[in-house]
Image (spheres, rainbow, N blue to C red):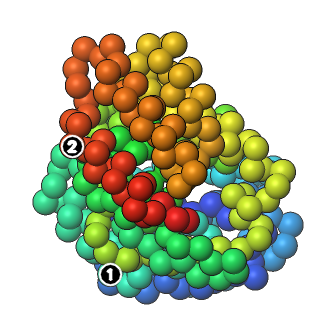
Amino acid sequence: MSKPYLSIVMPTRNRAHIFMETIESVLNSSFTDFEYIIIDDFSDDDTYNILKDINDKRLKVYRNNKNGNCSYCNHLGQNLAVGKYIAHVDDDDIIFKDKFEKQIQFLDKNPDIKLLGTHIETFGENVRPAWVFYNEPEILDFVMTFYNPLCHSSIMYDRLFAEKNNINYNINYRCSQDYELYKQFILKGGLIANLDEILCKYRMHNIRLTDVKETQQIMTDEAEYVKVDLLKRFLNEEEIKQVRTLLKDFPFNDYNTDDVEKAFEIITNGNNQVKLYKQQIIEFVLNDIKNGRYKF
């Protein structure tokens, strides 16, 4: 029996009331050569019974014997996957019919790109504008140092590159495991890009980890660890401290443009042996900040 070309991983917990829309969007994809790995993280609703009753041979359902977390489930999902590429889908989002097909076409033609996202459309409660608007690896590599410019539900990545470089979801991360995963790709030399097309609908609601008060600080702290690791590529300890003092939490707001400029100047003049970022990229991003592109 041949291996599927694509592995799709989706952890879920207590989302029986909402996840069928997500599952149907995956099963109705125009690209059909995939396995769909769904990991029930010890739900106490009807999740597992609903999943077992879905009649599709591509679906592979696993159930944890205790509640872990998203990082653990995603880590396990990658270990179970056998496809050339792995795609992630959150259990409350919706993917477009041709999303997988278009991403695979792009990755097959551009083997230097190891992780690929797409643009997104937001919907649901308290809808805010999308934060995904850069496509080029050079720009994404730079802004990734300050915030997460990808949508987790949109990503697809090269499984063999990840395995060869010991890249996987860090089970010690509770909320920013996606951001930490992208960091691993960058530090191992894997280029990251976004398709310039909306191919995923990102659901906003009040029980997302991003919006739950108890997890917001955890997410902020974990994101800071990622940023520091990325800054270590080209700044020393004192310079990193200066940059992080200037740019706390989400850094690009209209009220702190002066601090952003100071931080970028430190990076430009840093004690890096190789200039990773051309001045024109920094000026491009700074111009977007000044023009209010980061109003999300």
Give the image quarter of residue 263: top left
Name the residue rendered at 68%, 36% in the picture: 221
Could you say which disc has been placed on residue 280 in the image?
Answer: 2
Q: Quadrant of the C terminus?
A: bottom right
Give the image quarter of residue 42: bottom right
Q: Residue type at mark 1?
A: Asp
In terms of secondary structure, where does tag 1 sit?
loop
Name the residue rendered at 51%, 37% in the picture: 259
Name the residue rendered at 49%, 83% in the picture: 25
In terms of secondary structure, where does tag 2 sit?
helix
Q: Quadrant of the N terminus?
A: bottom left
Q: Nearer the viewer, mark 2 or mark 1?
A: 2
Tell which of 120 and 165 is nearer to you: 120
Relative to 65, 191 lies left or right = left
Looking at marks 2 and 1 on the same chain, the residue that comes earlier in the sequence is marked by 1
Name the residue rendered at 82%, 55% in the picture: 213
Q: Which residue is mark 1?
A: 98
Relative to 66, 3 lies left or right = left
Q: Position of residue 144 (x, y in %)?
A: 42, 43
